[in-house]
């Protein structure tokens, strides 16, 4: 009996992992080509039951986590060397691939979290896990291409055989795309003009970057 349960669990895991090979690139493609539509899809999926939620895509937090892990694996394959941290916490974080991927996922998740909190505060909605879930999930979709772009730019910058300018240009282009989509999202959600929405989007991004830097200080220097 226990063996049959184990076998069924393995079958379910194998099926789920295999479907990732299909739905991961499809989901990323939808985000890149139709970001606002994909974010609206995420909002709509929150109303579905757990079994059928995100049935034709990867869930946003899972997509972001898988993306961060893949970016790190690509960096490792390209032998992009990270600077050695001076702190015991930093050495613990960089001790394994799992720790690095988890830490990076937490860092990137600050961007959707800050955006979600900004939206709810401007809508005068009480902060709670329930109210944060929908905008946070939608923002995780938007953060996924950013993780790819930042990781790719970082790899280019640290490759001695490629001009660093291309890496910085790649990251700047990604930041502009992100801010444009974020501006339209805030404009739609809050009923703001594009100018005011752009200020809200830029402010949320700056705050998120500040929080990431604060999060990095004890890892790198403490």
Image: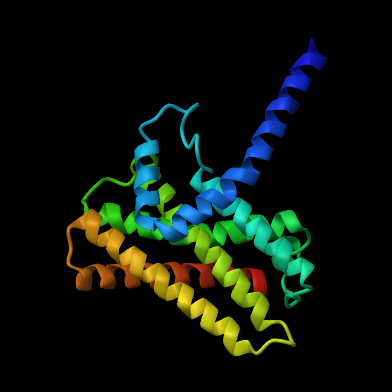
Front one among 5 and 82 = 5
Question: Relative to residue 220, is residue 30 drawn left or right?
Answer: left
- Outermost top residue: 1
Question: Relative to residue 79, is residue 59 drawn left or right?
Answer: left
Question: Relative to residue 81, is residue 32 drawn left or right?
Answer: left
Q: Hey, which quadrant is residue 91 in on the image? A: bottom right
Quarter holding the C terminus? bottom right
- Picture coordinates of residue 67, whole percent (x, y): 61, 56
Examine the rendering and report whether any part of residue 102 can be seen.
Answer: yes
Determine whether 46 is above or below 121 in the image: above
Q: Residue at x 72, y 54 (%)?
A: 98
- Outermost right residue: 3
Q: Residue at x 63, y 76 (%)?
A: 154
- Picture coordinates of residue 145, whole percent (x, y): 51, 62
Quarter holding the N terminus? top right
Examine the rendering and report whether any part of residue 222 can be seen.
Answer: no
Figure disc tally: 0
- Picture coordinates of residue 17, whole percent (x, y): 68, 39
Q: Hey, which quadrant is residue 134 in on the image? A: top left
- Picture coordinates of residue 8, whole percent (x, y): 73, 20
Determine whether 18 is above or below 102 in the image: above
Q: Residue at x 49, y 47 (%)?
A: 60
Applied colour scheme: rainbow
Q: Residue at x 30, y 66 (%)?
A: 183
């Amino acid at each position: 009996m226990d063996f049959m349960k184990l076998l069924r669990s393995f079958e379910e895991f194998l099926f789920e992992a295999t479907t990732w090979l299909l739905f991961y690139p499809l989901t990323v493609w939808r985000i890149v080509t139709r970001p606002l539509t994909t974010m609206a899809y995420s909002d709509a999926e929150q109303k579905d039951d757990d079994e059928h939620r995100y049935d034709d895509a990867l869930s946003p937090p899972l997509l972001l986590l898988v993306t961060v892990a893949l970016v790190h694996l690509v960096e490792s394959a390209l032998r992009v060397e990270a600077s050695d941290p001076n702190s015991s916490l930093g050495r613990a974080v960089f001790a394994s691939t799992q720790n690095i991927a988890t830490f990076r996922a937490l860092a990137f998740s600050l961007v959707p979290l800050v955006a979600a909190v900004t939206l709810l505060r401007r809508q005068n909605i009480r902060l709670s896990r329930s109210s944060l879930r929908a905008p946070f999930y939608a923002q995780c979709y938007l953060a996924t291409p950013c993780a790819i772009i930042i990781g790719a730019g970082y790899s280019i910058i640290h490759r001695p055989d490629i001009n660093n300018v291309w890496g910085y240009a790649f990251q700047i282009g990604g930041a502009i795309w992100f801010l444009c989509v974020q501006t339209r999202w805030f404009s739609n959600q809050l009923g703001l003009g594009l100018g005011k929405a752009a200020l809200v989007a830029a402010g949320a991004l700056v705050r998120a970057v500040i929080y990431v830097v604060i999060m990095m200080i004890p890892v790198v220097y403490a």
